[in-house]
Image (cartoon, grey):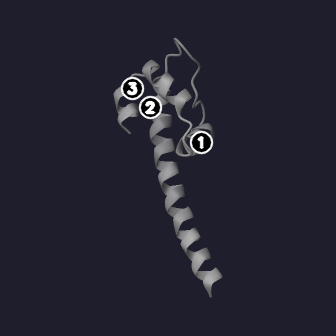
Amino acid sequence: MTYRMISNDLLKFGIMYGIFVMGFAQAYYIIYQSHNGANSSNPMKTPIEAILKVFIMSLGSFGDIWGSLGDTDHSLIGKVS
């Protein structure tokens, strides 16, 4: 009984977490399409890389992404989101 309640809660959390990760990954992928690469290379070249980078960002490591947002046309939107 307890196992089923915990597994249902984890399943619901996983589905919601996946939706948010996919949404933010799509947003950052679109933002990084305008990356001009003056100071660094594009950290999100493909949609799969965007998903993985957003997952890593959700764990607290977003220094690489933050630093290269200045090389895009939409740096303010990327920093706000």
- Measure the alpha-carbon separation of dots 1 and 3: 20 Å
Say whether residue 74 is visible: no
Q: Are marks 3 and 2 in contact (CB under 8 Å)?
A: no
Assign the N terminus to one quadrant of the image.
bottom right
| Side (left or right) of 45 relative to 29 | right
Numbered mark located on residue 56 in the image: 1
Mark drawn on residue 75: 3
Q: Nearer the viewer, mark 2 or mark 1?
A: 1
Residue at x 57%, y 81% (from the top left corner) = 5
Quadrant location of residue 9? bottom right
Query: Label 3, label 2: how many angstroms apart (C-alpha)?
Result: 8 Å
Mark closer to the chain start, 1 or 3: 1
The type of residue carrying mark 3 is Ser
- Residue 53 location in percent, x, y? 58, 38
Looking at the rendered structure, the kind of residue marked 1 is Ile
The reply, left or right, for residue 17 in relation to residue 3 is left
What is the three-letter code of the residue carrying label 2? Ile
Residue at 52%, 69% in the rendered image:
12
Q: CA distance from mark 2 to mark 1?
A: 18 Å
Q: Secondary structure at mark 1?
A: helix
Secondary-structure class at tag 3: helix
Q: Residue at x 59, y 42 (%)?
A: 56
**Between marks 3 and 2 in the image, the one whose residue lies nearer the viewer:** 3
Q: Quadrant of residue 10?
A: bottom right
Compared with residue 3, is residue 20 higher up or lower down, i.e. above or below? above
Q: Position of residue 48 (x, y in %)?
A: 62, 41
- Element carrying mark 2: helix
Residue 62 sits above or below residue 23 on the image: above
Q: Which residue does the numbered mark 2 point to in the structure image?
A: 31
Badge 1 crowding class, 10 Å Cα cut-off, few under 14, some 14 to 19, many 20 or more, is few
Which of the marked residues, 3 or 2, is nearer the chain's N terminus?
2
